[in-house]
Amino acid sequence: MVRLLALILAAALAAGPTAPPARAQSAGIVAVVNGDVITTFEVESRRRLFAAVAGLPLTPEVFDRITPQVRRLLVDERLRLQEVQRRRILVTDGEIAQAIARVEQQNSLGAGGLRASLARQGIDIRALYSQLRATIGWTKLVRAELGAQAEVDESLVRERIRAIEAAAGQPEFLVGEVFIAVDGPAQEAEAERTAGELINQLRRGAPFAAVATQFSQAQSAEQGGDLGWIRLGQLEPEVEAVLTQMPPGAISTPIRTAGGFSIVTLRARREVGRDMATLVAIRQVVFPFATALDPQRPTPQQIRQVEAAQRLSDSARGCEAFAQAARATTGAQLNDPGEIRLETQTPQLRQLLSELAPGRASRPLIAPDGVALLMVCGRRTENLAAPNPEVITETILRERVDLLSRQMMRDLRRRADIDFRA
């Protein structure tokens, strides 16, 4: 849930001009799901929510293009909520509020900051509440339905570790997926159209994680479609045949599998058991500018910020002293990104961090919106591909949850009475 909120919040904060609000007077009926009505207002609110998350312009053309996917999403969401209510799975307002509060805290927003961010995009907060209630409730329900299967036997974990060790040197793929289910021949054409339209949006620049979070019908949607590192033999043969031919960063065409259509992206490739990485723990202090910098005519405020950054760079020794001095400096913002992988950074940042002695601040790094200082707090080398029992346990549990979730949703759709209206 927090992953979903973080995506929504980041998109809302990064968006440009304020959008007009959704039209509350739109109250026609789009569909009736087992007697429950889905209104045009709900569709409009969710279209705006998805467009903001995906970074798409809030225009009538975009809304028309994504309406079929949104309608399908709302029908599935309503089926989940109905089953959650039938099984008496409780999702409290407090659980939703706690999830939102955690994200507001992580993004340095005060209470109500998320609501305000969405409101600037004309997004009704109830669209987010509804989605969260369905997601939280369905996750609780599927986990409860697993029963004893929710406990992963240590012998199975050891068996996976032996398989990884035996496959050392073979290719391994970091994969993201969007899955569109097909429960019967009558749904084949619509599911394929949905997959094709999502691919168009992805290739226009919509973030893969945002699209997966909103529209994927696999349990991996909770992680933005992230499947983690996958070896050959772990996915459907049809998916692997495409995946092995893809360059990193590519988006596949719709891939027909036994359960529906898969869209995959290859984020990275490596050899099983071999991925040595340099992990650097850093602290960052930013002195923001009130206006964009003109290097030929810096304002007095910008000059003061650069001078303050230079004093901190000259005086601070050690990460704790660096952090304390930043907290005590008016106009400074302290960030703690934690550990980052050196090899994945830009060449300029990689060189800077490689040359920076631990506990010593960098020179002031001036950008149009402010000046920053970096400090290396630790540096270590680790084989990220080494078998990790905790990660393997989580992977096995996720596979079981995903399989059960797909089976339960397929049964709900087959039993459902769904009446789409014009």
Image (tube, rainbow, N blue to C red):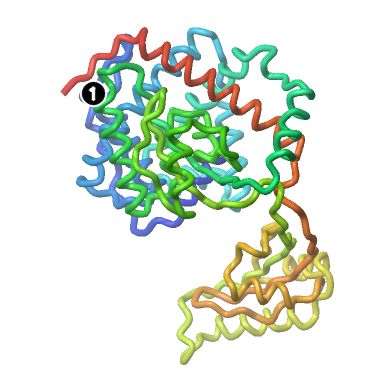
Whether residue 103 is visible, yes or no, is yes
Q: Residue lying farthest bottom? A: 296
Q: For this view, does 326 lie left or right of residue 97?
A: right
Split into 4 quadrants, where in the image is the N terminus? top right
Q: Residue at x 80, y 63 (%)?
A: 378
Whether residue 331 is visible, yes or no, is no
**Circle 1 crowding by C-alpha within 10 Å: few under 14, some 14–19, many from 20:** some
Q: Nearer the viewer, residue 376 or 86?
A: 376
Residue pointed to by mark 1: 30
Q: Residue at x 46, y 77 (%)?
A: 292
Residue 127 point in image, percent of width and height: 40, 33
Q: Residue at x 26, y 32 (%)?
A: 68
Q: Residue at x 63, y 70 (%)?
A: 286
Q: Residue lying farthest left? A: 422
Q: Nearer the viewer, residue 100 or 241?
A: 241
- Please name the amino acid that badge 1 sits on: Val
Q: Nearer the viewer, residue 200 or 274?
A: 274
